[in-house]
């Protein structure tokens, strides 16, 4: 807090408008996990706006300096060289528990105009935790439909994005930036936590997200084949298998039914179903 307030008694029960040193402020513990930073272009616009018009909407903080609302505004002010910033200090939230503070932060961020659909799905799902649904548990169909309706999108899209919301923030930010397709990020969500962390680290270090994901996923197919006794050289990717299935379907459809012996159980319909399931796994690519 700025020295102007050093000798004032602590206010309890209502918000107060105070000037604080930026060095005394700290981010909400889960902010980077839940939201991350704004894309560079959006952040640059925020910096320019504050430079031209000043800080029109002060951040909201707890009495201990924890930022509840306005992380990006504080970051922009710091970049502009500000040492102090006006804040609303939420003395009325002194007794709030961790869950109440989380919901306060989440509900505020649902109103951010810069949020992507993935951000909104992640927040909607976090709000469901109050109903006992952890981020890694399967969200009931009814809840996915409710989220989809509130966001104006399909249940299928919400299902995919909920899977992506389980991945590290670097992967999610690559999706938001258009560097990684949602379907590919969904496949990354199926990898182990260790593999996901390795992928995220490579993306953070500047590697192209698509290339990192492609290598990781192909490597995963090969390791799975090796565990099942197949050689890495003979392993086919799902796309190769899908193409092979389609060729078999086309060939069978050209044959007369009498060409099949009774003991042959393979049926074109079964192959088509297998191809459809594989296509669904590949995200309709």
Image (cartoon, rainbow, N blue to C red):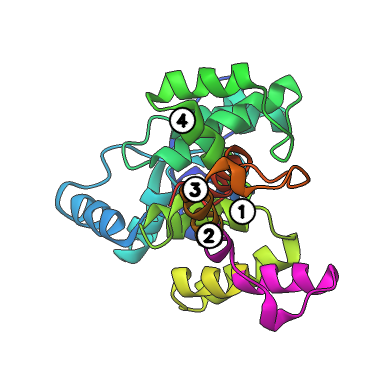
Q: Which residue is mark 1?
A: 167
Disc assigned to residue 171: 2
Residue closest to the far front: 258
Q: Total number of numbered labels?
A: 4
Query: Tags 2 and 1 in contact by the CB under 8 Å rule?
Result: yes
Of callouts 1 and 4, the N-terminal one: 4
Query: How far across and down, in percent of the image, does residue 262 sit?
Result: 75, 42
**Residue in the picture at 51% in, 57% down:** 184
Residue 110 or 239: which is nearer the viewer?
Answer: 239
Question: For residue 169, what is the image quadrant?
Answer: bottom right
Labels 2, 4: front one: 2
Q: CA distance from mark 1 to mark 3?
A: 17 Å
Q: Which residue is mark 4?
A: 108
Query: Is residue 38 highlighted in magenta?
Result: no
Labels 4, 3: front one: 3
Of callouts 2 and 4, the N-terminal one: 4
């Amino acid at each position: 807090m700025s020295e102007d307030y050093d000798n004032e008694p602590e206010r309890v029960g209502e918000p107060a408008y105070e000037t604080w040193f930026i060095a005394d402020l700290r981010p909400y513990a889960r902010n980077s996990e839940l939201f991350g930073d704004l894309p560079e272009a959006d952040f640059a616009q925020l910096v320019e706006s504050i430079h031209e018009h000043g800080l029109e909407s002060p951040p909201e903080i707890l009495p201990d300096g924890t930022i509840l609302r306005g992380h990006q505004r504080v970051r922009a002010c710091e970049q502009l060289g500000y040492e102090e910033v006006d804040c609303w200090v939420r003395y009325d939230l002194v007794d709030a528990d961790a869950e109440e503070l989380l919901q306060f932060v989440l509900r505020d961020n649902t109103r951010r105009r810069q949020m992507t659909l993935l951000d909104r799905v992640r927040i909607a799902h976090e709000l469901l935790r109050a109903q006992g649904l952890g981020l890694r548990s399967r969200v009931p169909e009814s809840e996915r439909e409710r989220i989809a309706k509130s966001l104006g999108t399909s249940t299928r899209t919400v299902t995919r994005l909920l899977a992506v919301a389980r991945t590290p923030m670097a992967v999610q930010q690559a999706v938001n930036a258009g560097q990684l397709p949602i379907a590919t990020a969904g496949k990354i969500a199926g990898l182990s936590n260790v593999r996901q962390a390795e992928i995220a680290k490579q993306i953070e270090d500047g590697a192209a997200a698509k290339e990192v994901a492609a290598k990781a996923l192909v490597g995963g197919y090969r390791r799975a084949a090796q565990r099942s006794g197949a050689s890495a050289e003979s392993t086919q990717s799902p796309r190769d298998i899908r193409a092979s299935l389609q060729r078999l379907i086309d060939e069978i459809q050209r044959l007369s039914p009498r060409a099949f012996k009774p003991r042959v159980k393979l049926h074109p319909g079964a192959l088509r179903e297998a191809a459809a399931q594989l296509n669904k796994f590949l995200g309709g690519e």
